[in-house]
Image (cartoon, rainbow, N blue to C red):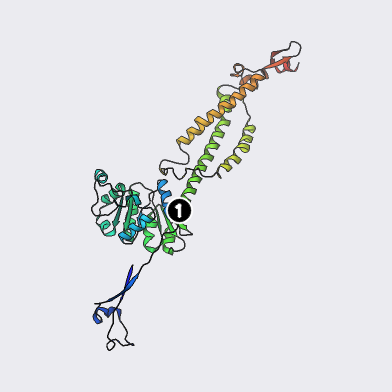
Amino acid sequence: MLAFADLELPLDEFGHDYRFDASLLDETIRLENLRFLGLISMMDPPRPGVAEAVRLCRNAGIRVVMVTGDHPLTAQAIARTVNIISSSHSRQTSISGSLVSTVSECELSRTRSIVVPGDELAKMSEEQLQETLLLYGEIVFARSSPKQKLRIVEAFQRLGEIVAVTGDGVNDSPALKKADIGIAMGIAGSEVSKQAADMILLDDNFSTIVVGVKEGRRIFDNMKKTVGYILSGNVTTIYPFIAYATAGLPIAITTITALLIALGTDIVPAISLAYEKAEADIMSARPRNAKRDRLVNVRLLLRAYAYIGVLAGCCAYVGYFVTMNRNGYTPAMLWQSRRQWEGNGTFPHWVYNDTTGQYGLVDTVKELLY
């Protein structure tokens, strides 16, 4: 809000050719008894979709904190508009007067939201700042300087958080550089902020960040699906060779067959999994732990090797034993029969006798031929 007023000056002292000097204004003109002319209001409304994007971030477990140079009351109003401060908690929101020091005090005050002006932030110690970040779920920092923005980022990082910072000016450059992910504005952003950032938004829209988060989660999930599919398929082709070496079972597939299976049934489905659409609840899942949730972890290996791989291998061997049994080879005959199948040409073989109408056991290739 801007207020306008005027002051009538005597013409004999201030003629039409009089030149005003701003530095000597207080000495030449007494600004008293001004006539009020009116007010002009300016508004820089949030972009459409920002409030919904903030809501999606909150559902996805992403905490949105507002750091601005605006007045605390202005920052509070904007934060409530874009859902950074919940309207349902507006009465509990405080322009930080006295910060609570314990969790029990926070529960008693029932305060979820807080606006911290820059002058109070300057008086807070590092421990008090971290305590504030932990106790309050919705935080707005107002009248913040570039140094204070950097301090806030460092405080979050000390708490083990992955911090993404958006900014467009030179004052945001230190925080953009320090953050784990610095995001600059491509249209309104300065060159300094673009150089300090890791990513540049071409449309200067906060909603694009949410789209990027969703796409990143989809790619990560699809990569886990691809790796899990390949591992479970590979271990299934390994089991016949393991059974061949340990139990002496005749090998179910040859090396060439295993290679053909890998080339024919692994590559194309694995590539198709990379183009899978995102799950419906992908933006409702909690953020993964960067230190623990790797692309290939113990859970994925157990699922591929000990669950899917074993299940698929057992199903394949059921078909193997059924087929061999139909051709006259019982599982008991196949046990430790590898040497007989590959050794000196002597092997057990069941042959159907047309004369007797029964199967007979043949021990040698010669008996089989004659």
Q: Residue furthest top?
A: 356
Q: Is residue 196 above or below residue 285?
A: below
- Residue 1: x and y, percent? 33, 67
Identify which residue, 219 or 250, lies in the foreground: 219
Say whether residue 24 is left or right of residue 165: left
Identify which residue, 333 or 341, lies in the foreground: 333
Look at 37% across and 47% down and name the residue there. Answer: 161
Say whether residue 364 is left or right of residue 148: right
Badge 1 amino acid:
Ile
Tell me the quadrant of the picture where the C terminus can be found.
Answer: top right
- Residue 354: x and y, percent? 76, 13
Look at 52% across and 42% down and name the residue there. Answer: 222
Q: Is residue 129 above or below residue 268?
A: below
Q: Count the labels in the image.
A: 1
Of helix, strand and loop, which one carries label 1? helix
Identify which residue, 18 or 234, lies in the foreground: 18
Res 217 seen here: yes
Say whether residue 166 is left or right of residue 321: left
Look at 36% across and 56% down and name the residue there. Answer: 79
Looking at the rendering, which quadrant does residue 313 occupy? top right
Look at 60% across and 18% down and name the residue there. Answer: 331
- Residue 291: x and y, percent? 40, 43
Identify which residue, 72 or 293, lies in the foreground: 72
Q: Is residue 66 above or below residue 107?
A: below
Q: Which residue is mark 1?
A: 209
- Crowding at dot 1, Cα within 10 Å, few <14 / some 14-19 / many 20+, comes out as some
- Residue 349: x and y, percent? 68, 17
